[in-house]
Amino acid sequence: VPSYLLAAHSIVFEKWLNESNVKKMAAARETAQTVVGNTNESSSSSTPYLHTMKLPFANMDAIEAAIHFLATRSLPEGLVKNLTETPSEFYIRTVCQIYFIGRLFKIHSLEDEAYRSARVGMNRVPHLVCAAFDECMSLEKKLAGEESCQLPASKNELKEYALEYLRDSPLTTLLAGGTPFLNYDSISAIICDQDMNVDEYTMFHILRSWVVQDEGRNLKAGEELASHIDFAHIKADHLINVVKKCKFVDASCVNAALEEIEEMMANRSPDEKEHVLVD
């Protein structure tokens, strides 16, 4: 990729190129270039002024789309068409990666365009909001361990949008086929989120839908995450007929919840009990 194309859009690239190439680019202006990729190939001896920046968090589709945007000021037509007409997990995750490229290198126009395109895809197929949230969580974790790739301190607007969408519409996202897109960190963040617009029984169903799609891998994690659900706030018949029969909630937890419910019922004052008026 020509260095001027990157530097023209990103102050991060501009600063990096100026610091590392001032003398070399003056001596070999025509051959100096920057390659952005995620491969492990080293620079060829025939290109002495070749610089490689690795982006281990992004696939080649995301990288090529970002470069296409820098050259044309628009994302590739095929990507846009897929996001607007037939969104899929792959395209949602790809556009999230493009968004992170924009954030990482402070290319605000790319960041804004990727954010807008991601929202189009999520609104088109709501359960893909789970894939977007999971990708944002995963990318932040990956980049946290990369010294050369540090995200700005500003808020991650795309992750916040996805999280708010999940909070407001769990039935059309998480419980509509979205939980298989979530890894442990993502489902943990959701189960522990205090602003999720669900009751404890719905939260149990969210966790169960994640566990059952791969019980061999998720059962132990399900047992751990179940500790964040207050089973005493679930109806007794649901506890007995549904919760107690699942594999990731220990029977002792259900029994303890049933005892707590009985105790709460016994301690209720007459004014709190339901009255039936007969004419």
Image (spheres, helix red, strand yellow):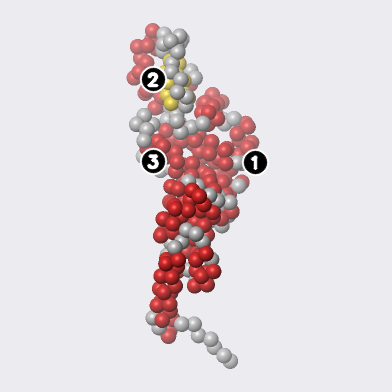
Q: Amino acid at mark 2?
A: Leu
Q: Which residue is the site of mark 3?
A: 154
In this orientation, which residue lies closer to the viewer: 277 or 10?
Answer: 277
Residue 158 visible in the shown view = no
Three-letter code for the amino acid on which mark 3 is drawn:
Ser
> Where residue 220 appears, x then y in whole percent?
44, 53
Callout 3: 10 Å neighbours few (<14), some, many (20+)? Answer: few
Residue at mark 2: 17
Residue 60: horizontal and vertical position, in percent? Answer: 53, 28
User: Image quarter for residue 171?
Assistant: bottom right
Residue shown at the point (61%, 41%) measured from the top left: 87
Precedes in sequence: disc 1 or disc 3: 1
Cα separation, mark 2 vs mark 1, equals 39 Å
Residue ID at (49%, 35%): 97
* Residue found at the far bottom of this picture: 279
- Residue assigned mark 1: 86
Vertical position of residue 233 compared to residue 109: above or below: below
Q: Specify which label sits upstream in the sequence, 2 or 1.
A: 2
Q: Nearer the viewer, residue 44 or 80?
A: 44
In the image, residue 70 lies at what x, y percent? 51, 26
